[in-house]
Image: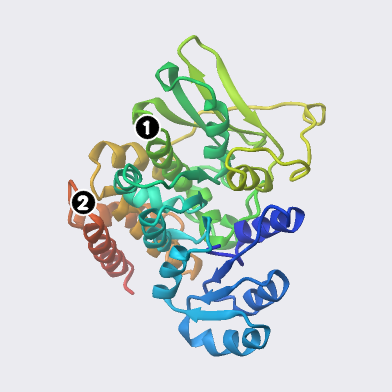
Amino acid sequence: MLGATGSIGRQTLDIIRQHPERYHATILSAGSRVDELINLAREHRPRLAVIAREELYPKLHDALAPLGIETAAGPTALAACVEADDVDMVLTATVGYSGLEPTVRAIAVGKDIALANKETLVVAGTLINRLLKTSSSKIYPVDSEHSAIAQCLRGEDLASVSRLLITASGGPFRTWPAEKIAKATPYDALKHPKWHMGAKITIDSATMLNKAFEIIEAHHLFGIAPERIEAVVHPQSIVHSMVEFADGAVKAQLGVPDMHLPISYALGENLRMADVAKPLRLEDYAMLTFERPDTARFPCLALAHHCLQVGGTAACTVNAANEIAVAAFLDERINFGDIYNIIERTLATTSFVAAPGYDDYVAINAEARRRAQGFIGI
């Protein structure tokens, strides 16, 4: 489990608690929440616990060594742990670019992947699909939208698909005018109306860049042409995504806003487990509504089709610039409206590789981060 102390990681451990006969957390990792990692390791007794920040290693080691739990630290250890022989599936629930290397290494050794890190396919979807062709690995999407699409596509012929419709809550600024959005504070942006997520993905929801990323991810996961993938705003967050077919029929996956369901569906490799989420009662909802997204107020959404049209390292650059810009916004160094501007300027000035390999993604990610930092004045 990469990202055991985050929102997805904690909910995954809920499912493991419910089904100890089926699952065991062999390896737990975290970025910096060492106390939480120690507590989770004491409960779940993994073979190995890994902390990304090396300066926190002594505390991790001293707490877990008496229990016979192995410990390690640093990015190299995080990436290498996915290759362990006693691991059957890797849950990638880290945030941002950090999910790419472990996913590449897991595919190289044939591990199945429960993918909650959307940036992996955003940054390098073409590379990941190329690697999957020569590996026994399978990817099971954890994002609720992509899990919904996967469920709707089971038993269907992809040739009969007209459109993928990815739903979006609209975030906290769905009804705000553009002038007010531009001046929003981190406090405003972190008040998501439906989901409880980490700060980074909550800001991405507020800019709607997360929906742009999900369009890119859906293209790489399901092989549907970019022009046939759209976002639709659905404030109630009950319909998690839809598939429209050539005959005009639309299939939708509905459920309460609860990530336990898509996580369990991924861990079960498309099998359904009982009692993982509260059942949906449609009679409790007077109305389900749908709206067209407004790219004038949320320009980040339009980056999806731009990146898919351009290809190459464009999406890698967008992701890197966004990570820098969001961090600066949360630190109150820039305004909310500056996030898109920094992404746009970084995209216009960063080198472009049309047919990248892994090393190209690494280099472009580093260059884009430097340029974005320069625009911010870091």
Under circle 1, the secondary element is loop
Q: Is residue 238 above or below residue 364?
A: above
Quarter of image, res 32: bottom right
Residue type of the residue flagged with mark 2: Pro
Residue 345 quadrant: bottom left
Give the structural element (helix, strand or loop) at label 2: loop
Query: In the image shown, does 370 or 207 lie closer to the viewer?
Result: 370
Q: Is residue 239 left or right of residue 104?
A: right
Q: Which colour assignment does the render follow?
A: rainbow
Q: Reply above or below: 105 against 374.
A: above
Residue at image coords 55%, 54%: 202
Residue 181 percent across, percent down from the top left? 50, 49
Residue 155 x %, y %: 53, 22
Horizontal and vertical percent position of residue 58: 55, 90
Residue type for callout 1: Gly
Which residue bears the numbered disc 2? 356
Position of the N terminus, as image quadrant, is bottom right
Residue 223 numbered mark, or none? 1
Considering depth in this image, is 115 or 172 the residue closer to the camera? 115
Q: Percent from the top left, x then y, of residue 201?
A: 52, 55
Count of numbered badges drawn on the protein = 2
Quadrant where the C terminus is found in the figure: bottom left
Image quadrant of residue 304?
Answer: top left
Gap between marks 1 and 2, in whole Å? 19 Å
Relative side of 271 to 108, left or right: right
In the picture, measured across the screen, residue 323 lies left or right of residue 56, that is left
Classify 10 Å Cα crowding around label 2: few (below 14), some (14-19), many (20 and above): some
Q: Is residue 333 visible in the rendered structure shown here?
A: no
